[in-house]
Image (spheres, rainbow, N blue to C red):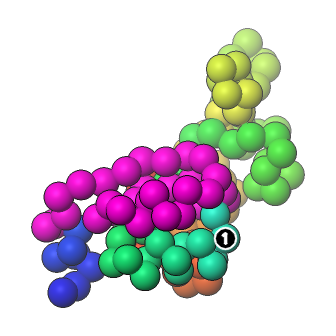
Amino acid sequence: MSLRERFRTASNFVLYYGYGKTKELSNFDIAIIEPTAHTKEEINKIKESNTLVIAYISIIEVIKDSPNYNLLNEEDFIHVNEKPLINERFNTYMVSLSSERWRNILHHNIGKFINIYGYDGYNW
């Protein structure tokens, strides 16, 4: 059965942002997970149970500790009253989708997650 068919016929899913829980994630037809929180080995372990593993990618937020943050310039961020817009609840910086640099980073990351880490797809 193709990935598309497996996705269409899935009867349950989990959305998980934390670390670990490989065994628990394997109990679902689809696991949508934070890609920076899991190793390639963990992804493969989840997939062994026939679970589709989807990388969740935030397209408008970046944390300061992320390597992607250091690739951005001041003009890549959304500004309000000349200050970068910050989601204070999660301490994330809001990035403009009009930034070509940011879009290139997103495309690069998607390719990496699928081609190197083995994710079955991505969601944003």
The residue lying at 70 percent from left, 32 percent from top is 92
Visible residue check, residue 98? no
77 and 113: which one is in front? Answer: 113
Q: Quadrant of the N terminus?
A: bottom left
Any magenta on residue 11? yes
Q: Position of residue 9 (x, y in %)?
A: 13, 67
Q: Which residues are magenta?
A: 8-37
Asked whether, in this view, residue 23 is left or right of residue 42, the answer is left
Residue 73 percent location from the top left of the image: 82, 46
Q: Is residue 60 left or right of residue 31?
A: right
* Image location (x, y in percent) of residue 66: 79, 50
The quadrant holding residue 112 is bottom right
Q: Residue 2 colored magenta?
A: no
**Residue on which the image places disc 1:** 39
Look at label 1 and name its amino acid: Thr
Is residue 2 or residue 84 the one in the foreground? 2
Residue 93: x and y in percent read 71, 33
The furthest residue to the front: 23
Q: Residue at x 59, y 72 (%)?
A: 42
